[in-house]
Image (cartoon, rainbow, N blue to C red):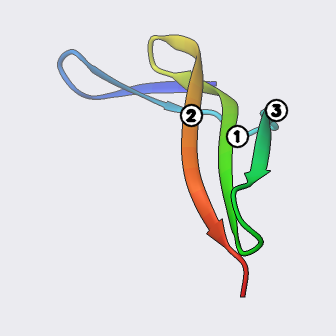
Amino acid sequence: TDRSSIAPGVTTVNDDGFVLSYGAGVGWDATDRMQVVLEWDRHRLNFAGGENNINMYTAGLRFKF
């Protein structure tokens, strides 16, 4: 990890490497042509203040053509 400062109180980080992301999701067929989808993803990211887990929750509709 390479840390530098671009301004007083502002720290930047340059960290090249492999980071694991994972998630899970479910889908329900509401009709023959439409599906309701719920998903969760977790990303482990490195910030200037340390490592943090970022969770993303999504809900959507898929239409079949």
Q: Tell me the distance, in whole angstroms, between the alpha carbons under discs 2 and 3.
A: 17 Å
Residue 32, image x and y in percent? 77, 71
Q: Tell me the distance, in whole angstroms, between the alpha carbons under discs 1 and 2.
A: 26 Å
Q: Residue at x 69, y 34 (%)?
A: 41
Q: Amino acid at mark 1?
A: Asp
| Front residue of this view, candidates 30 and 7 | 30
Q: Nearer the viewer, mark 3 or mark 1?
A: 3
Q: Amino acid at mark 3?
A: Leu
User: How busy is the neighbourhood of tag 1: few (under 14 within 10 Å), some, or many (20 plus)?
Assistant: few
Residue 24, image x and y in percent? 80, 35
Q: Quadrant of residue 12?
A: top left
Label 3 SS: loop
Q: Residue at x 72, y 88 (%)?
A: 65
Residue occupied by mark 1: 16
Q: Mark 1 or 2 closer to N-term? A: 1
| Front residue of this view, candidates 30 and 63 | 30
Residue 45, image x and y in percent? 61, 27
Query: Dots 2 and 3: beta carbons under 8 Å?
Result: no
Q: Tell me the distance, in whole angstroms, between the alpha carbons under discs 3 and 1.
A: 13 Å
User: How busy is the neighbourhood of tag 3: few (under 14 within 10 Å), some, or many (20 plus)?
Assistant: few
- 16 versus 54 height, above or below: below
Q: Is residue 32 left or right of residue 3?
A: right
Q: Amino acid at mark 2?
A: Tyr
Residue occupied by mark 2: 57
User: How busy is the neighbourhood of tag 2: few (under 14 within 10 Å), some, or many (20 plus)?
Assistant: few
Residue occupied by mark 3: 20
Label 2 SS: strand
Label 1 SS: loop
Q: Quadrant of residue 7?
A: top left
| Front residue of this view, candidates 15 and 50 | 50
